[in-house]
Amino acid sequence: MNDADRLLALIPARGGSKRLPRKNLLPLHGRPLIEWTIGAVKGIADVCDILVSTDDAEIARLAVQVGASVPWMRPPELASDSAGSVDVAIHALDRYEAEHGPVNGLLLLQPTSPFRTTSSIRKGIDLFKHGGGLPVLGVSPIRMNPAWTYLIDDGLLVPFADAPPSSLISLPQYIVNGAFYLVTGNHLREYKSFTGSRTIPLVFESEVESLDIDTALDFAVAEAIANGASQ
């Protein structure tokens, strides 16, 4: 592995979850949810390590069993509902580099995107390697153009967009899907963000790959997809 290809894959998986309790361990078609993401990134040559950041002993044991590394437990202040993913990522990156030397980039993969494929991860890495150090962010086409959306102000509908719908309807629109984040450590530490004024999109055209599990309904949809794919 060349130094330029040395990427740290980070999977954040705390034990607490209000909307869907213990979601990272829920069995999806016979496999715990977090195992889907670990499996998708295993074997990618550019990844030097798969690090799981967790405060939960059960998640840690499972992660190690299926091929990830959990060299330390996440501190309580980074495991609360208010803790941000940037702070979690910087903490993991700082500790890893202190022990193993610098990496070329941090690849954040949320375990709530179980259908994200190895092929898509590799595509995102290629974009990063040829992007001059710019962040790469996973996005998906949106179904509803924001030009047709409204706010409610003092009981009345107010158009969300100032421009008339006709001027925006033909422009492709995208939304962050949570499936892929890749950034240099310098950018992450300086800007405290996975994006910048110039960010390369990794477009997920597949609605299945773009699925982000946050609620019981999301998980039911994922189960239907996984069970259907196996038939």
Image (spheres, rainbow, N blue to C red):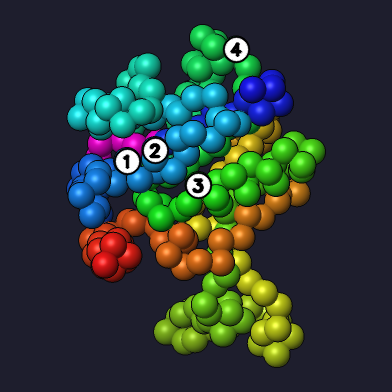
Q: Amino acid at mark 4?
A: Gly
Earlier residue among tags 3 and 4: 4
Q: Few, some or many C-alpha atoms within 10 Å of disc 1 (few <14, some 14-19, many ≥20)?
A: many
| Left or right: 140, with 41 as reference point | right
Query: Majority secondary structure of the magenta segment?
Result: loop
Residue type (three-letter) at the residue carrying disc 1? Glu
Q: Which mark is in front, 3 or 4?
A: 3
Cα–Cα gap, marks 2 and 1: 5 Å
Q: Which mark is residue 35?
A: 1
Q: Which residues are magenta?
A: 12-17
Q: Is residue 108 above or below residue 155?
A: above
The alpha-carbon separation of the residues under discs 4 and 2 comes to: 22 Å
Point 61% across, 81% down: residue: 147
Q: Which residue is identified by label 4? A: 101
Q: Dividing the picture into quarters, in which one does residue 1 lie?
A: top right
The answer to whether the residues at label 1 and label 3 have Cβ atoms under 8 Å apart is no
Q: Earlier in the sequence, mark 4 or mark 2?
A: 2
Q: Residue 133 in magenta? A: no
> Quick one: quadrant of the C terminus?
bottom left
Q: Secondary structure at mark 4?
A: loop
* Residue shown at the point (58%, 79%) measured from the top left: 145
Assess whether mark 1 and mark 2 are in contact (beta carbons under 8 angstroms): yes
Q: Is residue 14 magenta?
A: yes
Q: Secondary structure beneath disc 3?
A: helix
Name the residue rendered at 38%, 51% in the picture.
114
For disc 2, the marked residue is: 38
Mark toward the viewer: 4 or 2: 2
Rendering coords of residue 56 (x, y %): 24, 29
Q: Toward which corner of the image does residue 226 lie, by quadrant?
A: bottom left
Look at mark 3 in the image and give the residue it sits on.
118
**Residue 106 located left or right of residue 155:** right
Side of 229 where 144 appears, left or right: right
